[in-house]
Image (tube, coloured by chain):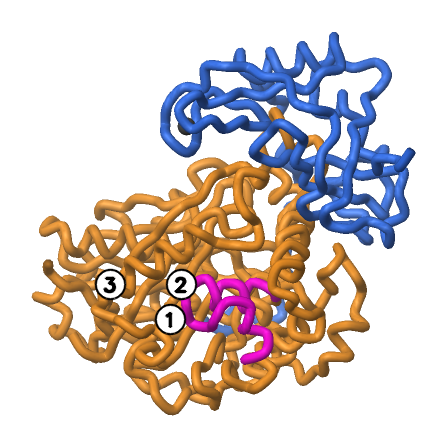
Chain colours: A blue, B orange
Amino acid sequence: MTDQFQGIEPMVYKSKINVPYSWWAGDTASKFYLTLRDEKKITATKCVACNKVFLPPRKVCPSCFTENTQWVNVSDEGTLITFTIARRQFAAIPSDRKVPVIWGLIKLDGADTAMLHYLDEIKPESVTIGMRVKAVFSEGRKGNIRDISHFKPVSRV
Amino acid sequence: MDRAAIIGVGTTKIEKSKVGETFADMAWEAVNKALSDAGMTIDDIDNVVTTSSDFWDGRTISCMAVGDASGAAHKNVSCVEGDGTYGAFYGMTRSLSGSYKTTLVTGHSKGSQSVSSLITNSSFDPIYERALGMDMVTACAMQARSYMHRTKTTPEQLAGVSVKNHGNALKNPLAQLPMKITIKDVLESEMIADPLHKLDCSPVSDGCAAVIIAHESVAANFKQKPVWIKGVSFCADSFFFGDRDLSRAKALTEAAKKAYEMAGIKDPKKEIDVVELYDAFTYQELMWLEEMGLADDAMAGKLLEKGEFNMDGRLPVNASGGLLSGHPVIAAGLYSMAAVVRQIRGDAGGFQVKKAKTGLVHGVNGLGGQSHCVFILDKDK
Ligand SMILES: [Zn+2]
């Protein structure tokens, strides 16, 4: 607002925010990840009042504010609801994934909500909304979301 | 119910990088502009609400770093994390509470100081989603795809939003990216995340905005003609992306409906004269217009092509240039509010629209518009 700083070189303090952090997964996500890791099964919680199955599983029904008391197995196959293809190597993309990276919102058979994950083993230009996809599980599963490696197109037999 | 009015606004120029200014320096400028606009001194301000995000600011209790420069010393100061419209909502309730008559609301952010992709990736659920590496751009690209699929809106129509808003910014000296561009320019710009090109996306920006909200009993005591808050509402949808129909914004429809009701608006298409909404990406302008009932379902793209949302059209939308022409996250909604206030007062300068008695301001919180805030402002009480 004043010109007393004319000609002063702006100084920049370069640093980073870097704080180790552990998120306790809680018993709902823990059960989901244990089943995924040990049995290669995808499980979800169900609200008995709404008769809806939620994936990712959570303890409370977002529709009716009651506790989801049941667990159900859902299919490893489902329908692609929407997707995007990153063409730029955004900073948030894990180092083992190179562009083009495709993410999809996938509604697995037996679930009422969709989950986010990668699509792979498909050319970007071949991805379409409504296509059928199937989970590919990772080797050496560690109990996290990447125990599913990605989803691939269901091959027509 | 008691009424509240906006009696002063102040905004810094939106810039790619305000390397010469700290957060507090930006706040100092915006607050002084708002006070001068209102014809007030800091002693006339009863309490202060600052709006910021700790992750974007790179520190905790980020609000506390701007208090001194906002004149909050020895006053009641509190903080809202989210878009500036949410700060204004809270500020309004304080002015209506009976405890305070005047509230200064600020919002600031600097996109230039961090890495947007990493900051917005941190808004995903850490246990189920974050490790997949999505961010605001890829999340919204997914929503754009979903909206285009349902409504058959075309990439050319999306590009038209960018052409219009960057063009409008040529008339706004505070905008960061005034540009005369064509639909071809947008479609030929880098494809960042299908279906969004670089020119479908808002830029990284720095800026701070301030508004002063007064109780009706004191609203006329100062220099400015009050702009009245006639209706306001905000509403949130489910957090998880896959719980929502991404091609829709149920929370916005609900928020707009409640704000219209409160303002006594029966036919928003006819009664609203000017709109500033959250166009972080081109598709959002069209989608939000439809979800607020300001365009028929799946028709906003066609209406845009007809010029209805131009500065001289039936319903001018983002005449200031919108966020596509400068997007200081958090401060954004207060910039939109300041623009509509100026329209209604008739002092929007180069981007003044012809008729501006009733205006709508829209702000967003969360990935892909999880939550929406709608204000209806009016010249008359
Ligand atoms: Zn339920």
Which residue is identified by label 1? B338
Label 2 to label 3, Cα distance in Å? Answer: 23 Å
What x and y, as percent, mark residue B108? 46, 56
Q: Quadrant of the N terminus of chain B?
A: bottom left
At label 3, which amino acid type do we have?
Glu
Label 3 to label 1, Cα distance in Å? Answer: 23 Å
- Residue B352 in which image quadrant: bottom left
Name the mark nearer the viewer: 2 or 3.
3
What x and y, as percent, mark residue B216? 12, 66
Which residue is identified by label 2? B334
Stretch in magenta: B283-303
What chain does mark 2 sit on? Answer: B
Q: Nearer the viewer, residue B186 or B67?
A: B186
Q: Residue at x 45, y 81 (%)?
A: B316
Q: Can residue B114 be seen from the camera position used here?
A: no
Picture quadrant of ligand 1? top left
SS label for mark 1: helix
Residues at badges 1 and 2 in contact (C-beta under 8 Å)?
A: yes
**Tag 2: Cα neighbours inside 10 Å, few (<14), some, or many (≥20)?**
many
In this picture, residue B277 sits left or right of residue B50: right
At label 1, which amino acid type do we have?
Ala
Which mark, by number, is residue B261? Answer: 3
What chain does mark 3 sit on? Answer: B
Mark 3 vs 1, N-terminal side:
3
Mark 2 vs 3, N-terminal side:
3
Q: Is residue B289 found inside the magenta-colored segment of the image?
A: yes
SS label for mark 2: helix
What x and y, as percent, mark residue A58? 51, 23
Q: Can residue B269 be seen from the camera position used here?
A: yes
Say whether mark 3 is within 8 Å of ligand 1. no
